[in-house]
Amino acid sequence: MRNPYLDEVFSPDRVMDPRSLAAMQPNRLSASRSFLAKMLHEGWRVDRDELRIDARGNGSARYTITTPTGSITFAAWLREPRGANRTGRIIGTSWDMLGTLIDGIATDAQIETSETELPKLYEGRAPEGTLIWMRSNQSLRLFRHVRDSLATGGQPDAAEVKRVGYLMRNTGLDGNGTFGSASFPAIAGDHPLAVSYHAQMLSAYLMRELSVDVVEELARLDAPATAVRLAPEVRRHIGVGNGSALGLVMFVYNRPVLIHSYIALTIEVLRHVLELPLEPGDPRFDRLESLLDRTIRYRVLEDTRYRVFTGGKQLAADLRRIRAVVRAARRGELVRGSAETLLAAVHRYAGARVAPEALQTLNTLLIELAPDHADALMQKRLAFEESLEFDPRTPASEIREALTETFGWAFELPLNDPAHRDRTWYQSRAAEEPRSGPAEEVPGAHEVIPNYPSRARELLGALDASDAGTPVGAILAEHPHLEHMARSALALRGLPYAVPHADPHDIDFVPVWLVRLVNAFVHGLDRTEDFLNRSVLGLIFDGAPFRDELATAPSDAWWWTYRPAGGRGTAEPDERPRAVRAAAVLPALAPKESAIIAPEHPAGDRITMRFRELRLAAGRAMQALGVPEGSWHGARDFFVTSLVADRTAVQGFGEALARSIAPDGSAPEWRAPAAERSERLIELDCHGQSLHAVGHVLVHAIASASTAGGIDVRLDAFEPDRAEAGLVLALARVGVELARVDELGPGAYRARIPEEPEAARARYRTAFRALILDGLEVPAQQWWDVYYPANAGLYPDTPLSRQHTGTVKDVYVPGQRLTRLFDPEEVERSTDPNRDTDQFISLNTDQPASV
């Protein structure tokens, strides 16, 4: 018998509310915790092979990670810290450490190539076998304090080490096809890093190990006769710093299958635990109470400053209330409903009386009552396929049913006034930095987050205006901007936890709710301190065992455990006036804007491209060509398909961009192909545009008109740009065969539905799988002739745009206009969550805020 309370508390309407998503806590299934549990269970070993560094901090390091199913290499290059463009934001170009994670025992050639290519970053190419490229910066003031203390034979101030929490701060963990790294779907199921985000978590773990090794070695170089190593009781307060902002909101909306997978798995494990037939006196109640005791002490004594989220002391008070309920259940004195388990009764009673974060904390602890069950499901469920397949021949009635089922919440969501639904999400030409702000402050910025509430209503209107049996492709050929909405409705059917039930284009939307969802719940960060409703600074592996402790450390004792720091040590407080401190450490932040004209490369150079970077660059290019929001997703995928079908398509697309994009980044207005249909012929006027830019619309029009008997197709006024093979393969993907009819001249084709459409689809899947496994080698110049012009799809780096992410004060110049996202006094009074430096300057502006 199903428990109606559990059905309600785990319903999509309840779970996917953004405030509920923000309350979700790290748990055993979160990436950092599941990775460390696997590492400890399987007996992994981490060995430092070499560390060569001079007293100024320049050098290199190499580590080998040994697992039961193979070895992995971590190589790092260290630099003396510099002040220019030093920031945790993606726009920074000053890094103290560049590193790489390479599958297997790395060869000398792999190491040499990595050392050469890593500093180039976006223009660099990772060697074969690369899993991750990473970047980090020292914590500066704390790093210096620790170094100086160890050099003199003493220990640093443990309280200060704990307050800051890191010696190195992660500024980038890039993989899954980025810069030529391996695509994660290509990683075999038995690989030690096959689970989602485990490669990134291993990288972060090694970043932490390196930070301690480097500070100890520098102290030894400073004073060989007196230097000591970090004491274990001080070292345990060191994690890896991590700052995140608006890019994670874009991530949530662009990775719906991943979001659903993590949430659905957690709910499945929770339901399993809550339905366990525990009786009064069961020893598992003692285990739960012990975990509550530990967590209460951790929360009441940890001093992280939360602003939007529930603070530690309030959380501890709610957890004490939950503990009382657990004790009553253990005694058999908790009233429960018919067929309700004791744990479900605990959850029901507490759920109505405590803050959402407290209930989610209970969820985390409940999962620990079935660790083996959780670990087994994690191995199976957190390696998943994310493609959103879609058949243009699907009848309108089925799309309508899928739309109301999958996005029913969007029709019920109360929307703000149109004047206040003007938030846009875009990327800047400054290192592709994700930004968000009022649309009038960045005119012409290309939207990157689907507008589900608006598009769902528009699609429903278009469907209702059509006959029930009309193929949806015919509707989308007339309304191309609705393609992504229709695709999402169909492909996400049955995935109820895929999309937050919110309007991210509402100016009052709180981005930090979704930033914390990913940081805490998916990645497993702790001490996630929020700032200005849009950024989060947290710690990875806070309290985790170091490599010399792996053999004996339990997997469930390191997190949410309060570790006293003891009395104050040798750290000297910074008593300089605030303005003096700010002037002393304020970084020189001058973002570099991405070029839109490719530099010349040697004619013989070739590079191997991976699926993710092809997709990312193609998306920007389609935006640069003016393909509308909701349609550029399909255009992007059409280009990738064209390249899979014929790798010379990269040359054709580069030529199309050269024709269309002016030196200032502007392009002619994009127009949807116009269709004329008769019983045996469909004519499509492409208005002189490249097949790359309109091919996705042609697929919908042709597929929806195709029959088993066949139909003639005539394409007029189009530039092939080597994408005709791509049109054939894109139609094969949806089970349609397309053949040229040469005797009728250019643009003449015959389309039909074959007797075995699955064979056509299989051709596409085979070709696409080859791209995932092997990548695609193309002439370097031809690729850069696509990559650089595609940057025209990014918004120019203006002073106002720079305020659309980050701390505002790190880029604001007195006298500038302030974005209307904030009240000037709100920003003036804000305090930076960066625990290591105070980089703020006085903010003076007469510009009013609208919120």
Image (cartoon, helix red, strand yellow):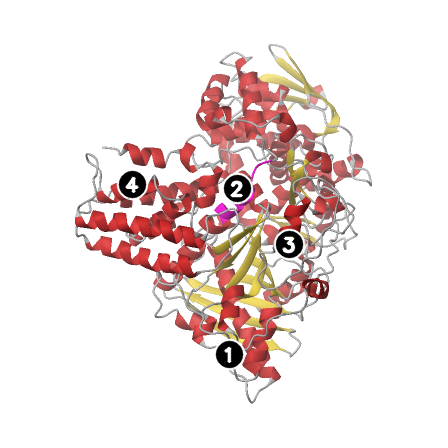
Amino acid under disc 4: Tyr
Q: So how many labels did they put on this image?
A: 4
Q: Nearer the viewer, mark 3 or mark 2?
A: 3
Circle 2: element type:
helix
Within 10 Å of the Cα at label 3, are there few (<14), some (14-19), or many (20+) other Cα atoms? some
Tag 4 residue: 349
Within 10 Å of the Cα at label 1, are there few (<14), some (14-19), or many (20+) other Cα atoms? many
Within 10 Å of the Cα at label 4, are there few (<14), some (14-19), or many (20+) other Cα atoms? some
Q: Earlier in the sequence, mark 4 or mark 1?
A: 1
State the mark number for residue 155: 1
Amino acid under disc 1: Gln
For the residues labelled 2 and 1, the Cα–Cα distance comes to 42 Å
Tag 3 residue: 89
Tag 2 residue: 252
The percent coordinates of residue 302 (x first, y second) are 45, 60
Left or right of 656 on screen, residue 255: left
Left or right of 204 on screen, residue 580: right
Instruction: Identify the residue at the far top of this view.
Output: 679
The correct choice, above or below, for 555 with respect to 747 in the image is below
For the residues labelled 3 and 1, the Cα–Cα distance comes to 31 Å
User: In the image, which residues are magenta?
Assistant: 508-518
Instruction: Identify the residue at the far bottom of this view.
Output: 225
The percent coordinates of residue 687 (x first, y second) are 75, 23
Circle 1: element type:
loop
Q: Which quadrant: the N terminus? A: top left
Left or right of 513 on screen, residue 557: left
